[in-house]
C-alpha cells in the first residue's frame, strides 16, 4: 500500500469510495451518515445519530432509512436502496426527508412498501408524505381497523396516532397522546384491536392529552402496552415494551383473529406476551445483557421478532438472538431457544438474496466526544454465523425480592436451550428497599442512590420556581460529620475546592442524575451553597441535597427553610416477614413440551431469611419452569443459565496481525472518526499524524493536531493492586481479574484506552487484556460497572479502538504484520490498523484471568471483601489462606443479580499455615463473589478462571 502525502481534504469534495472491500460481513462503502450537505463533514447540530431504523427487501432491492435522535419535522437523513450487486455504490434517493423513522410495513392491497414517510410501489417509484403535513417520528405502521384496503395507522414515538390514505396520501391525526409512557415503539392490529407500545418514562411533554392512565405511581411503572378497539383505549400493562407483531409480520396486522406477540422487560426479565382469543398471556425470558434497561428507554432502538427465511423467525432482545417459533401460542410454545449473544446494536434485520442482513446503530456522537460524526452500516452473513459470536448465557427469574401470595404460580420462565442452570431461591428481602425519597423537599423522587447514602439522614429545601436559582441553606450539628452533597449535574455547577468529588451518583426524576461531593465539618453551623447555574435558557437546576454521615444531632435553623429527613432505609412489611424458625415451601414445576401442561419437578424448603442454591441437572428436559410458595412472603427465584463459549480458543488467523502484549515494537496509535471528513484520523506517540481514507483505505500524512491529542488523551479508568484490577462505581469498589502482568503499567506510549462507546449507547471496556461490555445508564454519566459482562481475553497490545464505517478498528498491529483482509499497513511509515466486526471480539477466545479481593490483605472479622467479578467465566477455583495462629472460617458469598443481593454459598475452614482450594461445580454461575472472615487476620483470596 502506498503512502499518500498532503492529500487531506478538509470539508472538500469527498472522492468516491472503493466498493470492492468486504470485511467481517461489512461493505464499508454502504455506510450511512447523518449529514449529506457538507462534503463529508459533520458540522450541523441535531444530527448526532444515524442508526439504520428499518430494512426491507422490495422491488428487487434492499430499502432502508436512517434516523436522527429527535427530528419529527425531517433532517438530512436519507432513504437508501442497495442493489443486489453489493459492489455497487449505495443509492441515496432524492425523495428523502429524514427525521427519526423506523416504522415499515408492506401494504399488500396496494403493493406498496411503507417505510418512514415514504411509499414505494412495486417498480421502485417513491412517493413521500411531507413531515410538514405529518410531523412525527415514525416508529410503527399498521393495518387499519376499519378500512385496511385504503388506510393505515402511523404510530409516533411521541405518542400520537395518525391515519393515512395509501393512495391519496391524505393524513389525519386521530390522537395526540392517548396513553402514558414515552418513546413509542411498536404497533400491530389483529383481533379487532390496535396494540401499541412504548418503553420509557422520561416524558418530554405533559399528560394532559392522555385518555387513560397517567403518571407512573411506582418505580416499576415504566412505559406501556395498550390497546384500542376503535372506540376505547385500555392499558394492558404499565411496563417497558418494544416490538408488537404477529404471524403476518411486516404486513402490519391481520383482519382476523391471529395472535399478537409483543415483548418488553422489567427489572427481572424480558417479558413476552401473546394475545390469544382476546386474552393476554405472559412468558418470561432471561437477559443476556443489561444495556436496554434504563428507565428512559433510549437504549433499545427497535428489538424485533421477524421472519428471516421461509418459516424461520428470529427474536432479538437484551443482547441475545433467539429462534422464535412461527406458530408461537399458549398451547405450542416450544422452539423458543437462544441462538447466542451479541454486541452489535440491531434496530432491524431481514433475509435478502439468501443472506441474513442486520441493520446497525454504530457510532453516535451523543455524549460521545471520541467520535466526530455518527455512522452506521449493515452486516451481511448467514444465520449460522450468529452461533459463532457470544455464548447462549443469560440471567433472570420470575421473582427478585417480590411480595408473593401463597399458592399463586409465577409466570412461566424459559429454560430451554441452555446447557447449565444455577437456581437461587430465597425468603426475605436480599436488598433493603428504600422508601420514596424526594430530591428536594417538595418534588422529584430519588430513583437510585448508593446504599451507604440511603441509610443517612438528609437535609433538603424546596425547589420552588424552576426559573429562579435554587437557594442555599444552613443547619447545625453538635459534633463532627461528613456531608455528602448531591449536586445536579446539568450545567456543571461550580463547587469550591473544599468539596471533593466522589465516584457516587444519585439518580432522580425522569432520567436526571447528580454528582456527589464530600466534605468534613466540625461541630457547628454548616452552610450549603445555592445552585445558581442556568442549565438551559430560563431554567435553573435543583438545590443541593445534603446527606449527613455521623452520629451528630442535626438541628434546623429558623429562617433557612431547610427540612431534616430521616434515614431512607425501610423494612419489609411486617405481615409478610417469615420468622427464622419457620420455613417456606417452594414448588417448582416444568412444562416439558411447551403445551402448557405442567408437572412437579422440585420442592425446596427455605427457612425465613435464608436461601437455597442448586445446580439443576443438565438432563432436565423442559421448555418452561414456574414457581409457587405455600405462604405469603418476600421471595426470590432467579436463574443463571449458561452455555459453552462458541470460541473456546482464539481464532489465531483472524488476529494474526495484532501484536502480543509483550511486543514493544507494536505500532501504537490513538484513533478518531473524523468530524471534518468521513476518514479516520490517527495520532501516534512520537508526534505523527495520519488520516486513513474512506475512499481508498490508504494512510495519508497529516499535520499533528494538539487539540485532537488533548481530546484523545487516555486517562486510566481503573487501578491495579497486588490482588486485582479495581474499578469504582456509586462509591463502591469492584474488582476484576488480571491478565498478563505487563498490563499493570502503561505501555511505552502510555496507557491503552480502557473505555469507549463502540456501538451507539453501548460501552466496551478493554482492561488488563480482557474486553467487557459495560451498560450505560445516561449519556455522559459513568457506566454501570456492577452489570459488566466479559466478552473475551485477548493478550494483545491494543492501544486504542473504535467503530468506523461499520467496522471495528483496533490499533496495535505488529510491525511486520502482513497486509490481509483485516490488516491494512503502509510500508513507508510502518503504520497499520486491524479492521473487523464488533462481534469478532468474541473470537479472541473465552474470558480467563486470575485475581481476587485479598492478597496479603488486612481483613476484619465479619466485614465482607470487595466484590470480585464471576459472571461469564467458565472453570472457577478459589484458594484461601491467612496468617492467623488458629483456623479461620471463611464464607464465600455471591451476588446473584449484580445489584447487591448477596447469598452465602459455602463455609470453608482454613487451617493455620495452610491453603484451602475450592473448585466451583461445573456450570455454577453468579455475578460477583466476595469473602467474609470470622477473624481479624491477614488473608489471601484468589480466584483462578480458566
Image (cartoon, grey):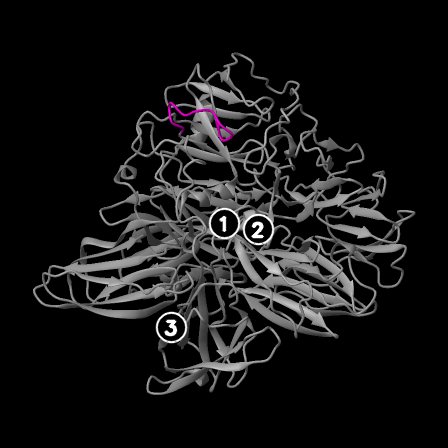
Q: CB atoms at circles 1 and 2 under 8 Å apart?
A: yes
Q: Residue furthest top?
A: 6
Using a 10 Å C-alpha cutoff, classify the residue at mark 1 as few (fewer than 14 neighbours), some (14 to 19) or many (20 or more). many
Residue 822 magenta-highlighted: yes
**Dot 2 lies on which element?**
helix
In the drawing, does residue 324 fall left or right of residue 906? right
Q: Position of residue 696 (x, y in %)?
A: 58, 21
Could you say whether the residue bearing mark 1 is in a helix, strand or loop? loop
Is residue 173 highlighted in magenta? Answer: no
Image location of residue 750, percent across then percent down: 33, 30
> Which mark is in front, 3 or 1?
3
Q: CA distance from mark 3 to mark 1?
A: 32 Å
| Tag shown at residue 299 | 2
Q: Which of the two discs, 3 and 1, labels the residue nearer the N terminus?
A: 3
The residue pinned by badge 3 equals 614
Q: Quadrant location of residue 548?
A: bottom left
Q: Depth check: give the residue in front, 876 or 131.
A: 876
Dot 3 or dot 2: first in sequence order is 2
What segment is highlighted magenta in the picture? Answer: 813-823
Secondary structure found at label 3: strand
Amino acid at each position: 500500500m502506498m503512502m499518500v502525502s498532503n492529500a487531506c481534504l478538509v470539508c472538500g469534495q469527498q472522492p468516491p469510495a472503493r466498493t470492492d472491500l468486504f470485511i467481517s460481513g461489512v461493505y464499508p462503502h454502504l455506510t450511512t451518515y447523518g449529514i449529506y450537505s457538507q462534503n463529508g463533514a459533520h458540522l450541523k447540530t441535531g444530527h448526532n445519530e444515524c442508526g439504520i431504523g428499518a430494512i426491507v427487501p422490495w422491488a428487487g432491492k434492499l430499502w432502508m432509512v436512517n434516523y436522527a435522535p429527535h427530528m419529527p419535522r425531517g433532517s438530512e437523513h436519507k432513504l437508501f436502496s442497495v442493489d443486489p450487486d453489493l459492489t455497487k455504490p449505495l443509492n441515496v434517493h432524492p425523495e428523502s426527508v429524514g427525521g427519526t423513522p423506523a416504522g415499515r410495513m408492506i401494504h399488500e392491497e396496494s403493493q406498496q412498501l411503507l417505510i418512514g414517510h415514504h411509499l414505494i410501489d412495486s417498480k421502485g417509484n417513491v412517493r413521500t408524505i411531507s413531515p410538514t403535513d405529518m410531523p412525527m417520528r415514525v416508529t410503527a405502521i399498521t393495518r387499519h381497523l376499519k378500512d385496511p384496503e385504503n388506510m393505515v395507522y402511523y404510530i409516533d414515538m411521541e405518542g400520537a396516532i395518525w391515519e393515512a390514505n395509501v393512495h391519496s396520501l391524505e393524513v389525519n391525526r386521530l390522537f395526540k397522546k392517548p396513553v402514558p409512557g414515552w418513546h413509542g415503539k411498536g404497533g400491530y392490529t389483529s383481533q379487532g384491536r390496535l396494540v401499541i407500545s412504548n418503553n420509557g418514562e422520561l416524558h418530554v411533554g405533559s399528560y394532559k392529552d392522555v385518555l387513560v392512565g397517567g403518571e407512573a405511581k411506582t418505580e416499576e411503572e415504566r412505559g406501556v402496552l395498550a390497546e384500542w378497539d376503535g372506540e376505547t383505549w385500555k392499558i394492558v400493562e404499565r411496563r417497558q415494551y418494544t416490538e408488537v407483531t404477529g404471524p403476518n409480520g411486516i404486513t402490519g396486522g391481520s383482519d382476523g383473529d391471529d395472535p399478537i406477540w409483543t415483548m418488553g422487560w422489567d427489572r427481572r426479565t424480558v417479558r413476552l406476551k401473546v394475545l390469544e382469543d382476546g386474552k393476554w398471556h405472559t412468558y418470561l425470558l432471561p437477559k443476556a445483557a443489561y444495556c436496554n434497561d434504563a428507565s428512559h428507554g433510549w437504549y433499545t432502538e427497535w428489538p424485533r421478532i421477524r421472519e428471516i427465511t421461509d418459516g424461520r423467525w428470529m427474536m432479538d432482545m437484551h443482547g441475545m438472538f433467539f429462534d422464535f417459533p412461527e406458530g408461537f401460542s399458549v398451547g405450542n410454545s416450544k422452539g423458543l431457544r437462544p441462538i447466542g449473544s451479541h454486541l452489535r446494536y440491531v434496530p432491524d434485520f431481514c433475509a435478502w438474496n439468501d443472506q441474513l442482513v442486520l441493520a446497525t446503530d454504530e457510532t453516535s456522537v451523543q455524549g460521545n466526544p471520541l467520535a466526530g460524526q455518527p455512522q452506521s452500516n449493515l452486516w451481511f452473513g448467514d444465520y449460522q454465523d450468529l452461533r459463532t459470536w457470544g455464548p447462549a448465557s443469560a440471567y433472570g427469574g420470575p421473582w427478585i425480592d417480590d411480595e408473593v401470595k401463597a399458592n399463586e404460580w409465577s409466570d412461566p420462565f424459559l429454560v430451554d436451550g441452555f446447557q447449565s442452570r444455577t437456581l437461587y431461591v430465597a425468603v426475605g428481602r436480599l436488598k433493603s428497599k428504600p422508601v420514596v425519597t424526594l430530591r428536594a423537599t417538595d418534588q422529584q423522587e430519588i430513583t437510585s442512590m448508593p446504599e451507604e447514602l440511603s441509610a443517612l439522614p438528609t437535609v433538603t429545601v424546596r425547589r420552588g420556581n424552576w426559573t429562579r436559582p435554587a437557594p442555599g441553606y444552613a443547619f447545625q450539628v453538635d459534633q463532627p460529620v461528613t456531608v455528602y452533597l448531591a449536586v445536579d449535574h446539568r450545567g456543571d455547577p461550580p463547587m469550591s475546592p473544599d468539596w471533593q468529588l466522589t465516584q457516587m451518583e444519585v439518580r432522580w426524576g425522569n432520567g436526571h442524575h447528580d454528582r456527589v461531593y464530600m466534605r468534613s465539618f466540625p461541630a457547628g453551623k454548616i452552610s450549603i451553597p445555592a445552585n445558581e447555574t442556568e442549565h438551559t435558557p430560563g431554567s435553573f437546576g435543583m438545590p443541593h441535597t445534603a446527606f449527613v454521615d455521623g452520629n451528630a444531632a442535626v438541628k434546623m435553623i429558623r429562617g433557612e427553610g431547610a427540612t431534616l429527613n430521616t434515614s431512607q432505609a425501610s423494612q419489609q412489611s411486617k405481615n409478610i416477614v417469615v420468622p427464622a424458625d419457620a420455613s417456606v415451601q417452594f414448588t417448582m414445576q416444568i412444562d416439558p413440551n411447551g403445551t402448557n401442561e405442567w408437572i412437579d419437578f422440585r420442592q425446596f424448603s427455605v427457612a425465613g431469611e435464608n436461601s437455597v442454591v442448586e445446580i439443576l441437572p443438565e438432563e432436565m428436559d423442559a421448555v418452561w419452569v414456574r414457581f409457587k410458595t405455600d405462604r405469603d412472603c418476600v421471595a426470590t427465584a432467579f436463574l443463571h443459565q449458561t452455555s459453552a463459549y462458541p470460541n473456546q480458543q482464539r481464532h489465531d488467523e483472524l488476529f494474526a496481525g495484532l501484536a502480543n502484549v509483550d511486543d514493544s515494537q507494536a505500532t501504537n496509535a490513538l484513533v478518531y472518526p473524523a468530524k471534518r471528513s468521513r476518514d479516520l484520523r490517527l495520532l501516534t506517540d512520537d508526534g505523527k499524524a495520519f488520516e486513513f481514507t474512506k475512499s481508498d483505505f490508504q494512510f495519508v500524512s497529516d499535520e499533528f493536531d494538539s487539540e485532537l491529542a488533548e481530546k484523545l488523551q487516555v486517562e486510566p479508568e481503573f487501578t491495579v493492586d497486588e490482588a486485582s484490577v479495581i474499578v469504582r462505581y456509586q462509591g463502591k469498589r469492584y474488582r476484576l481479574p488480571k491478565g498478563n502482568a505487563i498490563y499493570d503499567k502503561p505501555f511505552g506510549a502510555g496507557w491503552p484506552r480502557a473505555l469507549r462507546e463502540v456501538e451507539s449507547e453501548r460501552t466496551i471496556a478493554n482492561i488488563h487484556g480482557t474486553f467487557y461490555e459495560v451498560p450505560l445508564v445516561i449519556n455522559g454519566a459513568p457506566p454501570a460497572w456492577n452489570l459488566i459482562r466479559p466478552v473475551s481475553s485477548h493478550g494483545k497490545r491494543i492501544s486504542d479502538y473504535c467503530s468506523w464505517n461499520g467496522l471495528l478498528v483496533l490499533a496495535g498491529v505488529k510491525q511486520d504484520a502482513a497486509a490481509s483482509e483485516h490488516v491494512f499497513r503502509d510500508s513507508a511509515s510502518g503504520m497499520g490498523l486491524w479492521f473487523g466486526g464488533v462481534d469478532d471480539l468474541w473470537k479472541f477466545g473465552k474470558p480467563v484471568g486470575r485475581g481476587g479481593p485479598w492478597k496479603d490483605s488486612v481483613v476484619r472479622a465479619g466485614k465482607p471483601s470487595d466484590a470480585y467479578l464471576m459472571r461469564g467465566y467458565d472453570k472457577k477455583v478459589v484458594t484461601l489462606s491467612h496468617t492467623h495462629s488458629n483456623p479461620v472460617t471463611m464464607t464465600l458469598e455471591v451476588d446473584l443479580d449484580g445489584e447487591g443481593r448477596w447469598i452465602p454459598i459455602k463455609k470453608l475452614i482454613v487451617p493455620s499455615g495452610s491453603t484451602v482450594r475450592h473448585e466451583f461445580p461445573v456450570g455454577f454461575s453468579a455475578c460477583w463473589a466476595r469473602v467474609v472472615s470470622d477473624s481479624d487476620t491477614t488473608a489471601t483470596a484468589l480466584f483462578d478462571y480458566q
